[in-house]
Amino acid sequence: MRLRTRGRFNVKRWSRIVADRVRGTPFERAVAAARRAGRHDFLFGWNRGLGDIALGLAPLFARIRASDPRARIVVFTRADLADAFRLTDADAVHVVAGTARGPAIDVAAAAAASGIVLPEAATVFADPDPTRWLDGRRQAYPPALRWDPAWNARADRLVPAQPGTVVVGAHVHSETAQHYGYVKDWPAERWRALFARFPARSGVRWLLLGNAALPAFAQDNVVDLRGRTSFLDLLALVRARCRVLVAPDSGVLTAAYYLAQDFPLEIVSLWSDPRQGILKQGCPSPNPSLKHVPLVGRGEDVRNLSCDEVARALAAALDRCAPPTQNARADAAAP
């Protein structure tokens, strides 16, 4: 546990940690107070990252359910996160129109603007702090995202099944790198080289996943679906089409990792900081058939991962797939 900042003893953080351990976190105290008072309504505002819905909010929702089986959990969030909350244990999700990522959501104002009457005695978490509230407690309520099997059909209109081919999903850009103080994305030229290592003759078909079709990848055997799918569409492709997923630390990686479904999936993840995301969470996937191989760049910089390193991990993943791709290792080893 680090309690020093720039060589100084961090008194404020130390005091907060001690108080949380002795008295409970503000979240724990609020849930306990609601239980004592017989209040069952819990309101959350969320205007931050996609990945923390699984990493932070899903465990908090589970903690509330454990304390109060009668609890009703309602979320106010921005439009691009609404689908992700459908995978959680929230009872209702309300979109706050025109909201961009950043400032905390004023739950009362958002409800009033939408004509929603809030329960008078509700417990409100307008700006949840799962990083603090789950510190040292991340494994108590492991993340798990629900999946409706009917959603698998979403993949049919996008990518028809192709027997004999191994589909590899590639999330080539985290799309949230600007919110962090370090590099999260593997360089585009390495992705291009990786795609070339695994052409159609190796039995591989690449699917590019994400929100925006930049940078461009005009290569054979690459189907670019970026910007053409909803979040549920994207996860349906991972669930129903992809046998392998290659991705940086991102909300897409986190959601795929924590889908509570039993289906075969190989994940090769690419990292700068191993103290973030699913590695920080330290909880196994609820998918017993998932195999995860994390690759951390030397010096904690994802740009230091070579194409050879990623290709070897991908070739090993492909060789574990059924049916195995006969040329995967040979192509991966080629310069």
Image (cartoon, helix red, strand yellow):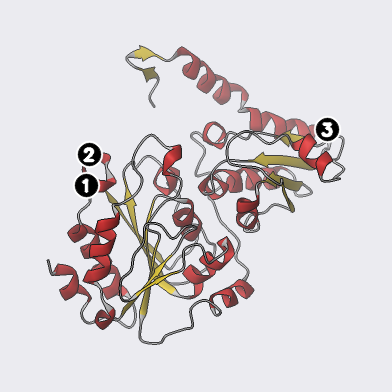
Q: Mark 1 points at which residue?
A: 304
Q: Mark 2 vs mark 1: give the one in front.
A: 1
User: What label does residue 37 carry, if any?
Assistant: 3
Q: Mark 3 vs mark 1: give the one in front.
A: 1
Would you say the residues marked 3 and 2 are in contact, meaning their CB atoms lie under 8 Å apart?
no
Q: Residue at x 43, y 45 (%)?
A: 277
Percent from the top left, x then y, of residue 319? 26, 74
Amino acid type, callout 2: Gly
Which structural element holds mark 2? helix
* Cα distance in 3D space between marks 2 and 1: 8 Å
Percent from the top left, x then y, of residue 45? 68, 40
Is disc 2 surrounded by few (<14), some (14 to 19) or many (20+) residues within 10 Å?
A: few
Task: Decide which of tag 3 and tag 2 comes sooner along the chain.
Answer: 3
* Cα distance in 3D space between marks 3 and 1: 54 Å
Amino acid type, callout 3: Ala
Q: Residue furthest bottom?
A: 163
Report the number of discs. Answer: 3
User: What label does residue 299 carry, if any?
Assistant: 2
Q: Nearer the viewer, residue 204 or 172?
A: 172
Q: Residue at x 56, y 61 (%)?
A: 231
Task: Decide which of tag 3 and tag 1 comes sooner along the chain.
Answer: 3
Would you say the residues marked 3 and 1 are in contact, meaning their CB atoms lie under 8 Å apart?
no
* Cα distance in 3D space between marks 3 and 2: 51 Å
Vertical comparison of 114 with 15: above or below = below
User: What label does residue 144 carry, if any?
Assistant: none
